[in-house]
Amino acid sequence: MSEFKLAWQRFVKDRVALIALWVLGILYAAALFADVITPYSLRDESRLHTYCPPTAIHFLTSDGHWAGPYVRGVAMSYDEYRRRIYRETDEAYPLKFFGKGESYKFLGVVTWDRHLLSVDAPGRVYLLGADSRGRDIFSRIIHGARVSLTIGLFGVLISFVLGLLVGGIAGYFGGRIDNILMRMCEMVMMVPGFYLLLALRAAVPDTLNSLQVYAAIVIILAFIGWAGLARVIRGMCLSLKERDYVLAARTMGLTDMEIVMRHILPHTISYSLAAVALAVPGYILGESALSLIGLGIQDPYASWGNMLSEAMNIVRIQFAPWILWPAFFIALTVMCFNLIGDALRDAWDPMLKGRGDQP
Amino acid sequence: MRIPFKTLKSTVGFFLLCSFVLWGSPAWAQSRYNGRLVLAVTSDPKSFNPILAKETSTTTITAHIFEGLTTVDPFTLKVIPNLAESWDSSRDGLTWTFVLREGLLWSDGKPFTSEDVVFTFEDLIFNDDIPNSSRDIFTLAGKQIRVEAVDKRTVQFVLPVKFAPFLRSLGQELLPKHVLADAVRNRKFSFTWGIDAKSADIVGMGAYLLADYQPGRRIVLRPNPYYWKKGAQGEKLPYIQKIEYVIVPSMDVGLLKFLEGSLDAYTMRGMDYPLLKPNEKAKDFTVYDLGPDMGSSFITFNQNMGVNSKTNKPFVAAHKQGWFADIRFRRSVAHAVDKKRIIEIVKNGLGYPQDSAESPGVGQFYCADVMKYAFDLDASRALLKDMGFTDKDGDGVLEDAEGRKLEFNLYTNADNGERVDVASIIRSDLERVGMKVNLQLVEFNTLVAKLTSTYDWDAIVLGLTGSTDPHFGQNVWRSSGQLHLWNPQQKTPATDWEKRVDAIFEAAGQEFDEGKRKAYYDQYQKIVAEELPVIYTALSARLTAVKNKFGNLKPAPFGGVFHNLEEIYIK
């Protein structure tokens, strides 16, 4: 295990990667505790607050006295060009921490009704602004993280199991098996990724409910992603199987499968771990792209991609730029995964450090 | 020394070209034969055959290529001569004689005769091999109109019964016999002039012809060299030499293209108003508001009891069909749809709630006095409860008496952002009364296929185009109609009210007194509002932004901005 320890020591020296790890940790924790953190539930909407801008949080009363954090009510009116103008009214709604709100099942088990941040109705708190139906974008981003962040992980998991197995078998046995498996990989890799994504989505029946759609997307993404990995693992296996310890294992009478699983695949772990981290962004972007064009996660469920589909319109971006927030979170997550992936690769194989062209 | 020579040469060439055009055109008109008009469409045409056309993506294009005997004045709604120069009817209103204009030529130079009119009706519209919506209109009291050629320029129509909107219905596009007769004989007409057709093969009487079609990219039209209509001074029409429809993936792309100046006109959505209106001066265009849209926008439920002959499965699950066929269910939905907020949120307040089957935009036949369903969630819930729906397991979704969840799929087309927004608002409205609705976004042509051939859908959010005469809605409202969305092409009316609507359309079609016709159509609108086969949502204001570069532009409430396209020129 000391190899892992050494690698970890090298990894923690990379400050940027460590920060990225923290950011991702916070995002995943937020997704896990979404119900508590968010002021509003996924289905909550207030149609009188169409594109309400981010709510200002006040601390002082109008005559300058300390009043604790509070928000004001808003009133909407149209101007001569039918633009929505929001003005703050005099009503004040104090911000409550762990106040009572809509009830939910905490972690899917316990029923609870406390929210980290909330205000009493009819006041509304929009930390990042509201969308067309007055839904809180902050709440939806956190709820949507559950989809956007997990779809990548599950997809990667499936395609890595597939990729490791296929690559390992092809590399170890070689010959005809290798030939057949690698041609299969090439068939998948031959088709441009996004079109394959669309074609596979079109093949899925259009009567699925949201959970089935989620599963379908995971499987589709995994199907697209496994081939590239399988090819690299195969290459590594080809060289690994010539090593002395493999010969030793074979002389000791281990079966082929045992040798592949116990002695060859574990040695590809250094590459695999980095590749996992580097592959996740592709899956996240794949889901976002699918949802963005309306073929992924459907309303009312949120994913960062389907939230962004509302921003595919210059009118809305111009008058309500805050609907672009999901794009920020997608970029942030993708960047973090890439930084961690780079750092992992460097940590496992310090000789490669600084040579970005290596797999 | 070389530069002046080159200039001179090109100048000579220019003069030659001009004198050629000048031949036969008044001096002021020479400068009008230039330029192009660039417009955007969001969907590819499905065909270039006007007889088979079912959707606006097709008719937008075919309307330029084909014309009929009559047309309607877009300002007064009066019928005016088009390919026919005059007509006469017998005293009983059953025999109509039309005299065609002299010297009419098809776009391939062959003469247009009364034989072509006979061909269009007898061999195409009344041909059982050819599925088409026009047949519904020209079949009166179960009998077909008889069309006969008296001589080359005279054609006679003999109607089985009186038919009030007859003149108006003769806007029906006419097709050339000399081109299509073979295809009809070989039973290949249904595959003729599809999107794979060679542009030169498509022959029409309209101002423009198909020049080029690149799927997914553009449709280009060129002037018909034999176009019959002449300008006020007898000059050749049309003026604009090229019409280009750019196929854009979405309205948003169209908006961007309009703002960057590569489109000449843009059909606005309410939400575009705040962006475009303040730019009118700076970007040199004008926003025209032509009042409420003539069409309709609605949600409808599949009440089809039929069975797919291939898989032997019902088009829609029997228990769902049972819910959808229950008037209480549809009324419950009508009460739950928040029209006011749809207009506010989706259309930026620039819209009109719709209650009646006819839009206020169609003029005289609109009936305002129909049953209206106020936004009332309690009334909606009460109706569902009355049907036996209760939430047995407390998950917020109702179950019927047999314990089946009130869950269905709601389809709409993904490329129409505004419609997707309406569908998600309706979805969330219905969720509030306890329905679990799965939103399914598909391509527009997939949606058309579901409605007209595969019938495998539960609920659809969609729109239909409108017409100033309700009679032309027959293909939707008659129980035998092709577009009788919720249960199309019935042999006999499935319900009593569908039978009554059939009878109203039958009677109104024979009534010449406009007042009495209005009474009939008021009655049909009342029945539809009561029975709710489709539940109307909201109409957009018809807003079009047009660049300030066109002469002769005369936007008309019943014709749109470019209704007189052949006369429009670029200043």
Image (cartoon, coloured by chain):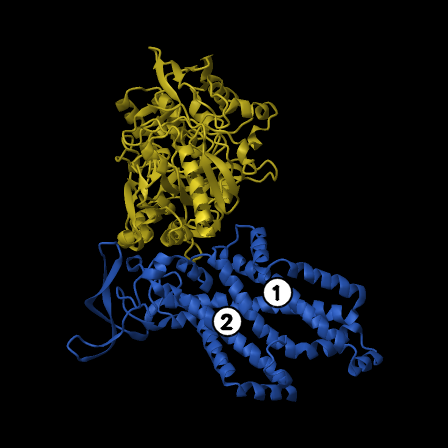
Amino acid type assigned to the residue bearing label 1 in the image: Gly
Q: Secondary structure at mark 1?
A: helix
* Side (left or right) of B38 relative to B189: left
- Marks 1 & 2, CB-CB < 8 Å contact: no
Tell which of B385 and B441 is nearer to you: B441
Q: Residue at x 56, y 31 (%)?
A: B192
Q: Earlier in the sequence, mark 1 or mark 2?
A: 1
Chain of the residue under the numbered disc 1 shown in the image = A
Instruction: Give the image location of residue A352, x and y in percent.
Output: 63, 82
* Up-down relation of residue A145 to residue B554 (above or below): below
Chain B tint in image: yellow
- The C terminus of chain B, quarter of image: top left
Kindly report the distance in space between the C-alpha atoms of the residues bearing marks 1 and 2. Answer: 16 Å
* Up-down relation of residue B218 to residue A234 (above or below): above
Amino acid type assigned to the residue bearing label 2 in the image: Val
Can you tell which mark lies on residue A225? 1
Q: Quadrant of residue A250?
A: bottom right
* Side (left or right) of B217 relative to A243: left
Instruction: Give the image location of residue A204, x and y in percent.
Output: 57, 52
Chain A tint in image: blue
Q: What residue would you read off at disc 2?
A: A334
How crowded pointer 2 is (Cα within 10 Å; few <14, some 14-19, many 20+) is rated as many
Residue B486 in sight here = no
